[in-house]
Image: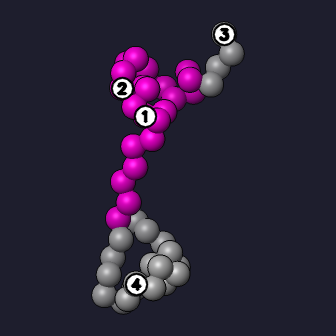
Amino acid sequence: MVHPKILINTAAIYKKINGFAIGLGVERLTMLKYKLKNIKDLYMNI
C-alpha cells in the first residue's frame, strides 16, 4: 500500500484515492534470468 502522505504530497485527493505499488527492479529480473533463489546471492563476494 502507498502511504497516505505520499498521496497528499502528490496533490491527490487522498480521501477518495487508494494507492497500491508494484515494483520489479533490476535485481528481481536478474534473479529470474539466472534462476537464483535468494537475492543475497547477487551481493556475495565469492
Is residue 4 visible to the viewer in this orientation of the structure? Answer: no
Looking at the picture, tell me which residue is in the foreground, 9 or 17. 9
The first of marks 3 and 1 along the sequence is 1
The residue at 35%/65% (across/down) is: 20
Q: Which secondary structure, mark 1? A: helix
Q: Residues within 10 Å of mark 2 (few under 14, many from 20)?
A: few
Q: Which residue is mark 3?
A: 46
Query: What is the x, y in percent for residue 26?
Result: 46, 35
Q: CA distance from mark 1 to mark 4?
A: 30 Å
- Mark 2: amino acid: Leu
Q: Which residue is mark 2?
A: 32
- Mark 4: amino acid: Ala
Residue 34 lies in the magenta stretch: yes
Tell me whether the residue at label 1 lies in contact with that at label 2, contact meaning CB atoms closer than 8 angstroms: yes
Q: Which residue is mark 4?
A: 12
The residue at 43%/26% (across/down) is: 30
Q: Quadrant of residue 1?
A: bottom left
